[in-house]
């Protein structure tokens, strides 16, 4: 990341120019299609060829970070950066899961949650 000087070799072709960094402000979020797989060390996992591993067909929600971030190859920003919904006192928000998942927030056991 950051400023780099790139010199294209004769056999290389530029398929996409420079892309802007994505900045998510406090109380905002964005949706990323085909997010990269992040390892336990917080860095993207790489293939044996040195390319980032992509979670094809998945969508990830990213919230505020201290600094802007780039999209890795294969990632795509869905829509725009949006404001989070604020739920007022004595009100509710009905949420429906679109797919099954395992809730691992609890240390003692994992709970399988079903969509719908």
Image: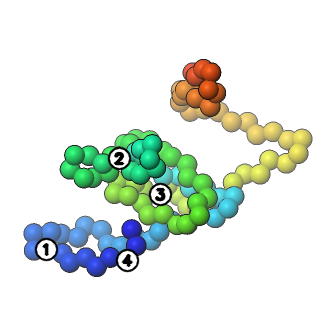
Q: Looking at the figure, which quarter contains the C terminus?
A: top right
In this figure, which residue is indicated by the disc labeled 2? 45
- Circle 1 crowding by C-alpha within 10 Å: few under 14, some 14–19, many from 20: few
Tell me residue 82's x, y (percent).
63, 59
Q: Which one is in front, 54 or 110?
A: 110
Whole-number angstrom distance, CA of label 3 to CA of label 4: 22 Å
* Structural distance between the alpha carbons of marks 1 and 4: 19 Å
How many C-alpha atoms fall within 10 Å of the one at disc 3: few (<14), some, or many (≥20)? Answer: some
Mark number for residue 77?
Answer: 3
**Mark 1 → mark 3, Cα distance in angstroms:** 29 Å
SS label for mark 2? loop
Task: Answer whether labels 3 and 4 touch (C-beta < 8 Å).
Answer: no
- How far apart are the two marked residues, 2 and 1, measured between alpha carbons? 27 Å
Q: Residue under circle 1?
A: 9
Residue farthest left in this picture: 11
Residue at image location 40% in from the left, 73% down from the top: 2
- Of badges 2 and 3, nearer the viewer stands 2
Above or below, comparing residue 10 to residue 62 in the picture:
below
> From the image, which quarter does the N terminus lie in?
bottom left
Residue corresponding to mark 4: 3
Q: Position of residue 4 (x, y in %)?
A: 32, 76
Badge number at residue 103: none
Q: Quadrant of residue 76?
A: bottom left
Number of marks in the rendered image: 4
Is residue 104 shown left or right of residue 34? right
Task: Identify the secondary structure beneath mark 1.
Answer: loop
């Amino acid at each position: 990341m950051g400023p780099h000087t790139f010199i294209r070799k004769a056999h290389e072709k530029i398929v996409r120019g420079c892309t802007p960094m994505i900045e998510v402000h406090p109380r905002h979020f964005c949706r990323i299609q085909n997010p990269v797989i992040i390892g336990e060390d917080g860095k993207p996992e790489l293939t044996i060829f040195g390319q980032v591993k992509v979670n094809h067909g998945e969508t990830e929600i990213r919230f505020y970070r201290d600094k802007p971030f780039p999209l890795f190859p294969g990632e795509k920003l869905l829509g725009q950066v949006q404001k989070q919904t604020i739920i007022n006192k004595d009100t509710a928000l009905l949420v429906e899961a679109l797919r099954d998942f395992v809730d691992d927030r609890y240390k003692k056991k994992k709970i399988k949650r079903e969509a719908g």
